Image: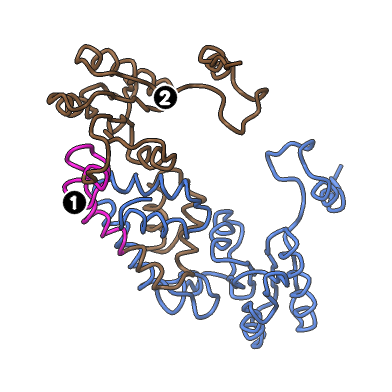
Chain colours: A blue, B brown
């Protein structure tokens, strides 16, 4: 419908996740009207990110060098590994400031329907990290959905025989939420995991 | 939270319309994992669009040359101009295949709250196009909201004394919609604009 490069831009934007044809069009017209310097900066950072950013050799978090900031940081506890699905989950956990150990990014979760089995994830690399006996505990922090649960179960069965403590994040009511809006599975988990309060 | 260029990318993406911090993060991680060639193509088209695409000297539609495809097309009726707010509205009207005249893109709508008055829009340029008497009718196709209506009223008062016929798009029930879900203003307009049916 549009002349040459405008349609190309709409098509390319439409390839990005969560951007449908209408949003792609709106963004394209914003770009047409925007300050050329702003758009040049966006184009530059797109290139830069693909040239500079890589994945950490140890934990597969995003990194600018062979190792990510966390793996390079000697103050981080090397005896605990938090296993997450994606690099963005590392950021979510970091924001809590509750965790001072290292990470391991699986690169997804087990999902037979999408053709993702244990071999498609960085599980072998996780086992290799446990080989020298430094790691005492693995905290499994996969997403609380079907795929995440399946991955957590698979990992637990694999890792416990290797002699490490394995733990999983607590399920329960989200803080700030309303009890009446909690789905029954969450509410059931909250009951199951209830804590007794001292008198 | 992220290392250098990843955070820069998230920040730049977050500047685009309709992309909040969460979407920006999701898109950034998609870009990190994507085929470098795909991202290079996106970066290239961003640059290209800013270098190549301009606005038509006559109607201010997007164009690759001094004049857009429609203004260059001798088969388009030069006696009718359809006035729209944005270039994307040209595409919406073109899709109907109902209109064979020319366009005029105002570049927005009158909105005192956003500091947009008639002088910020391409109204002077519209009047200049009417000067030689070729144009017989101006169809005002601004958005059916407060700003669009204000702009349409302003234009009608300005253009009618210049001796052109001025028309506006019909208001009424959207085709395929449900009467019970129509808001009262739309339903009121549908009554007001009702057409008598021949026996």
Residue B50 drawn in magenta: yes
On screen, residue B145 above or below A198: above
Residue at 39% x, 58% y: name it: B9
Q: CA distance from mark 2 to mark 1?
A: 30 Å
Residue marked by disc 2: B169
On screen, residue B106 above or below A70: above
Say whether residue B3 is left or right of residue A141: left
Q: Which residues are magenta?
A: B44-71
Pointer 2: residues within 10 angstroms few (<14), some, or many (20+)? few
Residue at 24% x, 22% y: name it: B118
Instruction: State which chain disc 1 sits on.
Output: B
Residue marked by disc 1: B65
Residue at 65% x, 23% y: name it: B179
Q: Are marks 2 and 1 on the same chain?
A: yes
Question: Residue A69: x, y in percent?
Answer: 46, 69
Instruction: State which chain disc 2 sits on.
Output: B
């Amino acid at each position: 419908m549009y002349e040459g490069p405008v349609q190309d831009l709409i098509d390319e934007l439409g390839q990005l996740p969560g951007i449908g044809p209408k949003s792609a069009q709106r963004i394209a017209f914003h770009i047409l009207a925007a300050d050329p310097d702003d758009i040049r900066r966006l184009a530059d950072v797109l290139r830069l990110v693909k040239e500079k950013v890589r994945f950490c050799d140890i934990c597969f978090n995003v990194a600018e060098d062979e190792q990510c900031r966390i793996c390079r940081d000697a103050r981080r506890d090397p005896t605990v590994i938090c296993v997450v699905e994606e690099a963005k989950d590392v950021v979510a956990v970091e924001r809590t400031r509750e965790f001072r150990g290292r990470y391991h990014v699986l690169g997804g979760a087990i999902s037979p329907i999408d053709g993702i089995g244990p071999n498609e994830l960085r599980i072998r690399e996780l086992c290799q990290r446990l080989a020298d006996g430094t790691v005492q505990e693995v905290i499994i922090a996969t997403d609380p959905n079907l795929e995440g649960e399946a991955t957590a179960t698979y990992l637990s069965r694999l890792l416990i025989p290797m002699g490490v403590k394995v733990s999983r994040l607590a399920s329960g009511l989200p803080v700030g939420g309303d009890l009446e809006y909690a789905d029954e599975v969450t509410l059931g988990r909250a009951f199951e995991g209830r804590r007794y309060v001292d008198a």
